[in-house]
Image (cartoon, helix red, strand yellow):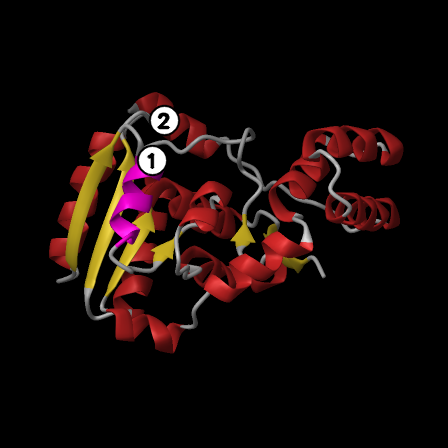
Amino acid sequence: MFSAIEECREISPILVSPRPELSEAIRDFYYLLDRGYNRRLVLDIVTSRYELSRVERLLLYRSVFPSTVNDLRRRKLIKEDALQKHGKLIVDGFNQISTVASALVGDTLVVSTDGLVRDLAATNRRVTFCPLYVSSLYLLLRFAGMLLKGELIIVLDSQISWSRHFASTLRELCDLLSLKCTVLLSNKADKTIIEQAQAGIPVASSDSVIADRVNTLFDLAGALGKVISPTSVIEIR
C-alpha cells in the first residue's frame, strides 16, 4: 500500500504542446490510414519523419483513426439525455478511472477523431490503489449517478494490481451514494463487457476493441474530464 501511495505522490502531468510538426504528423497519419496502409508501419514512418516524442507518438496511436472507423464509432455515441432511456450503463472500470485521474492531475486529454476522449497515461502511468485513483472512482460514480437513475454494471480487470481493493471500495461507495451497482471482476474484462452489452446496454469505454464490438457508447469519463479540466482538452479535427 505504501509503495502505491508513493507512486501517486510522484505523479506529474503528461503534456503535449501543439506544434506545427505534430499537426503535420496527424494529417499524414490520417491520410495514410485512410488509404489503407498498415497502422504500425505508418506510425513508425510518421514518427521518424517528424521526430515525434514518445507521448506524441502515443497521441497518434490512441487518437487518430481512418474515416470508416470514425463514422461507425460516432454513430454509436449517445448523448446524456438518451442515456437515461436505457436505464443501465456498463462501465469499463480502469479505462474510465484512468481518464478521470488524468483530468485531475492536468494531463492533456484528446478528443479523438472517433469522438471519444482519451488520456495519454497508457505506458506512462499505471493505476494504483492510492488517493488519486480512489478520488477518481468517487467522482466517476457521483457523475454517473447524476446522469443515470438506473443500474451501473462496473467491470474491473482482475489481472490489474489492487483490483480486489478497487472492487471492495466500489461497492462501499455505491452503498454510500445510494447507487444501484453490480461490480464484476473478470480476468477477461473486454470479453465480459462485450458479452454484457449484447443485451443492448450502452458502454462507457474508450477502448478501441470494445468500441468496435458494442452497439452503443457513452463517453462518461470524457464528459467528466471536460468538466474537471477543460483547458487540458485538445481536439483532433
User: Is residue 120 visible to the viewer in this orientation of the structure?
Assistant: yes
Q: Residue furthest front?
A: 36
| Residue 188, quarter of the rendered image | top left
Q: Position of residue 53 (x, y in %)?
A: 75, 32
Return the residue nearer the eye: 80 or 234: 80
- Disc 1 crowd, CA 10 A, few/some/many (<14, 14-19, 20+): some
Helix or strand or loop: what does disc 1 sit on? loop
Q: Is residue 67 above or below residue 93?
A: below
Q: Is residue 234 magenta?
A: no
**Label 1 sits on what residue type?**
Cys
Question: In this image, 21 relative to 212: left or right?
Answer: right
User: Is residue 111 visible to the viewer in this orientation of the structure?
Assistant: no
Return the residue nearer the eye: 71 or 19: 71
Question: Which residue is at a point 18% across and 45% down the rendered structure image?
Answer: 183
| Residue 120, quarter of the rendered image | top right
Return the residue nearer the eye: 61 or 223: 61
* Magenta highlight range: 189-198
- Disc 2 crowd, CA 10 A, few/some/many (<14, 14-19, 20+): some
Q: Quadrant of the C terminus?
A: bottom right
Q: Quadrant of the N terminus?
A: top left
Question: In this image, 207 relative to 26: left or right?
Answer: left
Question: Which residue is at a point 65% across and 39% down the rendered structure image?
Answer: 61
Helix or strand or loop: what does disc 2 sit on? helix
Judging by the rendered image, the residue that carries numbered circle 2 is: 4
Q: Is residue 194 magenta?
A: yes
Q: Position of residue 37 (x, y in %)?
A: 75, 37
**Label 2 sits on what residue type?**
Ala
Decide which of tag 2 and tag 1 comes sooner along the chain.
Answer: 2
Q: Position of residue 73 (x, y in %)?
A: 52, 58
Q: Position of residue 49 (x, y in %)?
A: 88, 33
Question: Which residue is at a point 67% across and 48% down the rendered structure image?
Answer: 64
Q: Cβ–Cβ below 8 Å for labels 2 and 1?
A: yes
